[in-house]
Amino acid sequence: MVEGFPHKLRTWWENFTPSEKLAITRRLGCLPMLFKITPDKHVIRALIQFWDPDHVVFAFKDFELTPTLEEIRYFTSLKYQRMGQIIPHSQSGKKFLRYLGLKNEKKLRCFENNWVSLDYLYERYGRSDSYKLFRKEFSCTLVHWQVRRPIAFAVALLGTLVFPREHGYISTCICSVARVLFEGVDGEELTVVPMILAEIFRALGKCKRGESNFFEGCNLLLQIWAMEHFHQRKNMDDICFSNIDHINSFYDRMKEFVYPVGTDDWYEFLAHRTSDQVQWKYPLLPRSPAYIRCRRFYYIELIGLKGLQPYAPVRVLQQFSQAQVIPLRANMRNSEISFGPNFEVPRAREILHEWDNILTIDIKNGPEKEILEYQIWLREDRNSISPEGEQGFEDIGTTIWIRHSRLGTKIVTPEMWAQMENIMRYLDNAGAGPSNVGASSSFPPPA
């Protein structure tokens, strides 16, 4: 977990010319502005206790919440729609040095373990005179060094603040990510947004399961994400006149938010929040369609830096100002896979194909509330699995059963009946099915 902003990284950024900064922000968006966020480890530690790694959501008192692709875009100003996901590659120390125009430093043991320090990168690329000072270590020309300098900064920024490792180690594989952001692949621009979100999910899961004590995701983005959602504003003046850089202007929007102090206070604050005490949708969230699910699965597979991560925004439709229905649900454990030291991405072509054909939903102005049946399902049946092969976002079979057996109503819409027929055909083919579907199958079809 990042607990303080490295001074050298900020100095490095300030040493760039305005034109160089503009070129970097075209690739990294507003990520360089993360140095203006004061880390709060207590909110992260409290949030981890509410994380549900099986469903990839925070499970609070009477609602679920999760960071979304659209919200990461909101903060970072990084695009992701109609752009491919980045596939990370292993990067040996030797390849790392050669790409950056440095001679092979056999005496540096860190490169044998595929990591580099911020100090090493800063001394050789952070100052305008670094090339002159370390001329003997470079195998490239000054022009080549000037071209590589912004990429070296991107490696340092991503490895320090976005994909941090314990002891401040920066993984050399991040160079493959930075290189794609600046150079593309076969003339195509790719996006780092899914990777940022995947690594936040991965870090939450590892910490919740007790597999790691170090949060390897971007805790700064997670921190401001949570504070934005739990600060309900009485007016929108701070939003309407907010800078388009939503990281830089974060504290302007939070000036009336009374922060809990310490992990225990944050836990008590979060434990007592109810669904009507949440800022469900960020007021300036772009109204472009939101990514909701793949055509094959009820969730989306994200390619992270160290593994695959499932993502199920169908469970948090209110974050897009849509009424929250009982979502279609699947067992997502098979989609949480670590790459290992060789960075072998399983089913890469299939995942990228699904990503290119993603299903979306409109972001409305809102706000919208959940349907009545949702709260019953959330209390009593949120761990169940939906039948495979359903279209849309709602588990209509479960909605009908709850409406009939728990709420005492037999109102079934034509859309519900059409999906029920699909469910019954699925169950007939499978030869089995949940008892709740059988209970609702006696309803006559609506006229």
Image (tube, rainbow, N blue to C red):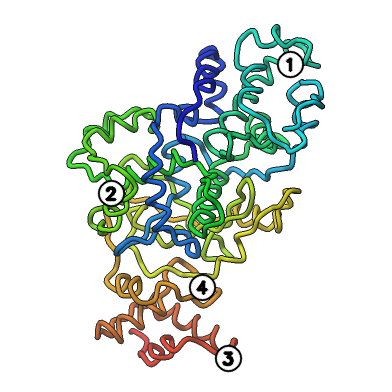
Work out how far the residue at label 3 is from the one at label 2, CA to CA, in angstroms. Answer: 51 Å
Which secondary structure lies at badge 3? loop
Q: Where is 141 relative to 329, above or below?
A: above
Nearest to the eye among marks 4 and 1: give it. Answer: 1
Task: Left or right? Give the position of 303 relative to 42.
Answer: right
User: How many residues crowd mark 4 within 10 Å: few (<14), some (14–19), many (20+)?
Assistant: many
Which secondary structure lies at badge 1? helix
What kind of residue is marked 2? Asp
Work out how far the residue at label 3 is from the one at label 4, CA to CA, in angstroms. Answer: 17 Å
The residue lying at 27 percent from left, 29 percent from top is 241
Quadrant assignment, res 188: top right
Among the two numbered marks 3 and 4 on one chain, the one whose residue lies closer to the N terminus: 4
The residue lying at 27 percent from left, 61 percent from top is 369
- Residue 273: give x, y in percent of width and height: 26, 56
Q: Residue furthest bottom?
A: 442
Among the two numbered marks 2 and 4 on one chain, the one whose residue lies closer to the N terminus: 2
Q: Residue furthest left?
A: 234
Residue at the spot of label 2: 265
Work out how far the residue at label 2 is from the one at label 4, CA to CA, in angstroms. Answer: 42 Å
